[in-house]
Image (cartoon, rainbow, N blue to C red):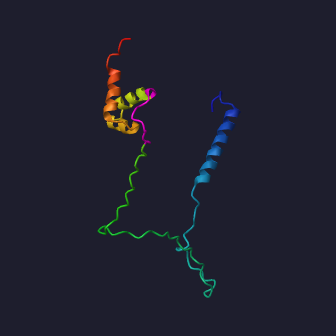
Amino acid sequence: MTDWESADDRNSREKVNRARQAAEDLFKPAQQTAPPELSPVSTASPTAPPPARRQPRVLAIAPRVPPHAEVQAPAQPKPMRPKKAPRRTTGAIPSSQLGRVRALANYGMTRAQVADLYGVTIEEIDRIIKEATSPSKSR
């Protein structure tokens, strides 16, 4: 011990050592003298039944399928058909929808799909798209 160590330091070190020892004792495996199968047989009473051994727990396992057995493939789910949009009775697309038609045709849908959506011919869709690309008429 050096002069700079105080009694408080020694006390705290002792506390730490006691706590460490208690933790080690807590996790030590319990000491067994000998397993019951190896212990000598008692001669107290030959007519008394021996203590019952604990039965091991047995879990049920599904039967194995032979590898050569034909395995049925799970049924394929039927593909879902997309719902059809209601057809318009008129052959003209409202002017408020012209920008939408152009956007649909330019960004993801084919002209045939857009025509089917609005219930018009592909020529009508082509005409709407060309109106946007042609130079505007002067007034």
Q: Is residue 41 above or below residue 110?
A: below
**Which percent across, then down, holds residue 133?**
32, 21
Q: Residue at x 39, y 28 (%)?
A: 103
Residue nearest the observer in this picture, 1 or 45: 45
**Which percent across, then down, holds residue 45?**
63, 85
Residue nearest the observer in this picture, 70 or 118: 118
Total numbered circles: 0
Quarter the N terminus occupies: top right
**What is the chief secondary structure element of the magenta stretch?**
loop
**Which percent across, then down, holds residue 2?**
63, 30
Q: Is residue 38 above or below residue 28?
A: below
Q: Magenta span covers which residues?
A: 85-96
Q: Is residue 72 above or below residue 28?
A: below
Q: Residue at x 57, y 65 (%)?
A: 32
Quarter the C terminus occupies: top left
Residue nearest the observer in this picture, 93 or 37: 93
Which quarter of the picture shows residue 17?
A: top right
Q: Residue at x 35, y 29 (%)?
A: 106
Q: Residue furthest left?
A: 68
Q: Tell me if residue 90 is in the magenta stretch.
A: yes
Residue nearest the observer in this picture, 138 or 80: 138
